[in-house]
Amino acid sequence: MTTATNHPGLEPLYRVDELSDGGGRILVCESQDLADAAISIGLTATAVPGGANRVRSTDLRPLLGFEEVVILVDNAGPGMKYICNLAQQLGAEKCAGHLTRAYPPGGQVGPGCWAKLLSINGRSAGDIREDVGRIIESNRRDQAASDAGAREGTGTLSQPDAGLVTVRASAIEPTTLEWLWPGRIPLGKTTIFASDPGLGKTFVALDIAARVSAGCPFADSQDVRNPAGGVVILSAEDDANDTIVPRLQAAAADLDRIVIVQGVKRFDPDSETYREGMFSLDTDLPRLEDAVKAERGCRLVIIDPVSAYMGRADSHKNGDVRGLLAPLASLAQRHRVAVLLISHLNKSEGTSAQYRIMGSLAFVAAARMGWAVAKDKEDGRRRLLLPIKSNLCKEPTGLAYTLADDTARPGYNGQPVVAWEGTPITEGLDELLRPDTGNQRGNRKEAAEWLKAALADGPVASATLVEDASESSGISRRTLFRAKDDAGIRAKRVGKVWEWSLPQ
């Protein structure tokens, strides 16, 4: 039993008189009931009466002689506060042992998890002690790896200190920015793609994944080598078997280099089994990091859509979004992978594209590059990939593409592929997203009537129509193409010429 006397003015630890003078491992529980449960099966345990808010008014000296101080974390918020306060009070120079945070297996955090794990329920006390020991050892190894990374500048220390962490600029070795897709998607950073539904942004994401997995160059960078690498995909909106994999096959992907995350197994204390649940950036980022490390030469992570993986965080609150995306950005930097976040545009027509990303503006602010997909107002089949923001280089040009059914391609499976155009697009995104005014709609109606008259005798080459419309009626090319869609005019390629004709 401990012989230490209480410090004047400080409260004693729970059941402090039953503690030994040190050595071995001691559990610091979030509640006195949990400490009682641990003690009842033969473990050394205590608690801070009053919880995290009373740590500074509690005499912690009896903990200093133990080789390892373990905090059993049941609640993420109070538990982390418990850890921080204990670490600051014990101090690295005073604590003889190591401070370990221990979560229930599977990352399950919530009131009563540890109580259920420590309860008998037909098991022997010895079996429970062994299970608890294995859980603590697993947490301790994970924490040791995290601390080692932090000391190398690749992670965050689990035991906070009161001082700043600084480095002199002259001691930092500059590095060259690397690109997954030159000038468009950087390695080691986050990039965001957004569009209205149905414009093919997921097709583009999977086209990028296929090129990375197979080591194929990008459409506008044919002379730049694109090393084959691994890809991790999280997709909440498309099924893997009938959508994602067939599209990847159509794009000639190397499927052996692509991993699709379908969920996370978490421990359920009620049934004492593991259940599969939705991945959450809030709680499961270490598991995503494990997947990145396990996939050989991983170069790309796709999260589609990012709003589906926010967990308990509010996607409309800047603080919540930044709190999730900052660790994700650190993961990207540590492993030199490009993280591609897929999002939707909201319905705020007429505003800048940056303000139309669904949810908080922090999504755009956190990303280093941003892109949006818009429909070409002159050609309803054509899509334009245009820049929203660029923090890493001068604003790049856009690209155009269509979704093409390449029936002549070997292995054609009915899925369209992204057919990129080589000519850069300099048109402004905000102009394309701006809704039509009444005058524009009137001009389109007049142009549609002109088209119907011009095509009354049969098909006409589109180039001829554009020239005649401009010369005879002052109708612009853009208005003519938009009127074509309004009137349901059909377009067909005849040899090297596109012909328009009236709908049947």
Image (tube, rainbow, N blue to C red):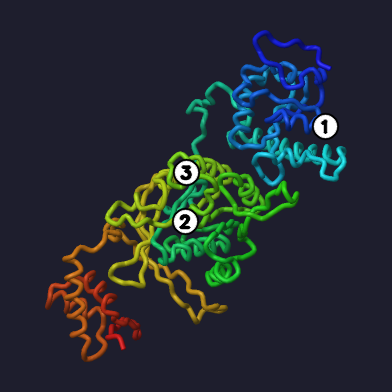
Question: Closer to the camera, 103 or 468?
Answer: 103
Q: Position of residue 445 (x, y in %)?
A: 19, 74
Between marks 1 and 3 in the image, the one whose residue lies nearer the viewer: 1
**Side of 428 where 46 appears, left or right:** right
Q: Position of residue 224 (x, y in %)?
A: 48, 58
* Residue type indicated by callout 1: Ser
Question: Closer to the camera, 13 or 448?
Answer: 13
Q: Neighbour class for label 2 at 10 Å: few (<14), some, many (≥20)?
A: many
Between marks 3 and 2 in the image, the one whose residue lies nearer the viewer: 3
Question: Mark 1 and 3 residues: CB-CB less than 8 Å, in contact?
Answer: no
- Residues at marks 2 and 1, CA–CA distance in whole angstroms: 51 Å
Decide: is 100 above or below 446.
above
Dot 2 lies on which element?
Answer: strand
Dot 1 lies on which element?
Answer: helix
**Side of 276 where 338 appears, left or right:** left
Task: Please tell me which of labels 2 and 1 falls first in the chain.
Answer: 1
Task: Please tell me which of labels 3 and 2 falls first in the chain.
Answer: 3
Q: Tag on residue 405?
A: none
Q: Neighbour class for label 3 at 10 Å: few (<14), some, many (≥20)?
A: many
Decide: is 76 above or below 406.
above
Question: Closer to the camera, 446 or 108?
Answer: 108
Residue, far top: 8
The structure residue drawn at horizontal position 17% and vertical position 80%, both measured from the top left corner, is: 450
Task: Please tell me which of labels 1 and 3 falls first in the chain.
Answer: 1
Q: Which residue is mark 3?
A: 321
* Residue type indicated by callout 2: Ile
Q: Is residue 497 visible?
A: no
Q: Which residue is mark 2?
A: 342
Q: Position of residue 190 (x, y in %)?
A: 48, 48
Q: Which residue is mark 1?
A: 40
Q: Quadrant of residue 157?
A: top right
